[in-house]
Image (spheres, coloured by chain):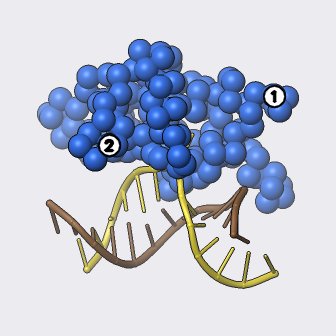
Chain colours: A blue, B yellow, C brown
DNA sequence: GGTTTGACATTAT
DNA sequence: AATAATGCCAAAC
């Protein structure tokens, strides 16, 4: 398989995974990478979402059927990548009932304990500790 | 066409 | 507790 074919396969896998995020919930770049069996590539998840085709493109996956706005970073923050981009994402989330707050630095956050995001995936060694701490998680492979 | 940049996360210092 | 190094690689420059 050629390099560009692999890249496309990866991007499509990302889009399909993002489509699994339920309405009104969010998850992280790292979680998507983990679900795809590539825990060291969270960054490439962002790359793929950046190049998500728009709804008019006629592509199978596009901004109209892939909920890109439900993906945030591991700190629970909406990553900013251009003027107004984070605000638009926050608005899209509020639109579906996800509360977004702004901290002292003007950063936009989604609080996982209150507003629910996909559970973290933890390796079995850490799972016990997390359970003791009452943390929300699922068992990783 | 080589180099830098960046929608990230984890580990090491 | 901060900060740096590392892995990753398509796009942009």
| Observer-nearest of A70 and A122 | A70
Q: Determine whether A113 is above or below A85 in the image.
A: above
Q: Can the viewer see residue A113 in this picture?
A: yes
Helix, strand or loop status at disc 1: helix
Q: Which mark is residue A56?
A: 1
Chain letter behind tag 2: A
Residue B2 rendering spot, x and y as whole percentages: 72, 84
Picture layout, residue A37 above or below residue A136: below
Element under disc 2:
loop
Relative side of A137 to A73, left or right: left
The residue carrying pointer 2 sits among few (fewer than 14), some (14 to 19) or many (20 or more) residues within 10 Å by Cα, namely few
Return the residue at label 2.
Answer: A106
Whether callout 1 and callout 2 share a subunit is answered yes
Which circle's residue, 1 or 2, is located before the other in the chain? 1
Mark 1 or mark 2, whichever is nearer to me: 2
In this view, the residue farthest toward the front is A83
Residue A20 x/y as whole percent = 57, 24
Q: Residue at x 53, y 40 (%)?
A: A85
Q: Which mark is residue A10?
A: none
Residue pictured at 35% horizontal, 22% vertical: A99
Location of residue A116 by image quarter? top left
Position of the N terminus of chain A by quadrant: bottom right
Measured Cα–Cα span from mark 1 to mark 2: 33 Å
Q: Quadrant of the C terminus of chain A?
A: top left
Seen at 35% across and 28% down, the residue is A100
Question: Residue A107 in the image: x percent, y percent?
Answer: 34, 43
Q: Which percent across, then down, holds residue A88?
A: 52, 32
């Amino acid at each position: 398989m050629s390099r560009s074919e692999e890249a496309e396969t990866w991007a499509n896998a990302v889009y399909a995974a993002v489509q699994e995020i339920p309405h009104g919930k969010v998850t992280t770049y790292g979680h998507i990478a983990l679900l795809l069996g590539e825990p060291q590539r969270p960054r490439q998840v962002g790359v793929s979402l950046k190049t998500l085709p728009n709804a008019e493109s006629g592509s199978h996956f596009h901004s109209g059927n892939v909920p890109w706005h439900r993906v945030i970073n591991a700190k629970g923050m909406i990553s900013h990548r251009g003027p107004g981009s984070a605000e638009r994402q926050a608005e899209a989330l509020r639109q579906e009932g996800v509360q977004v707050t702004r901290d002292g630095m003007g950063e936009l956050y989604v609080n996982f304990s209150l507003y629910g995001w996909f559970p973290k995936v933890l390796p079995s060694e850490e799972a016990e500790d997390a359970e003791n701490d009452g943390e929300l998680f699922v068992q990783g492979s």
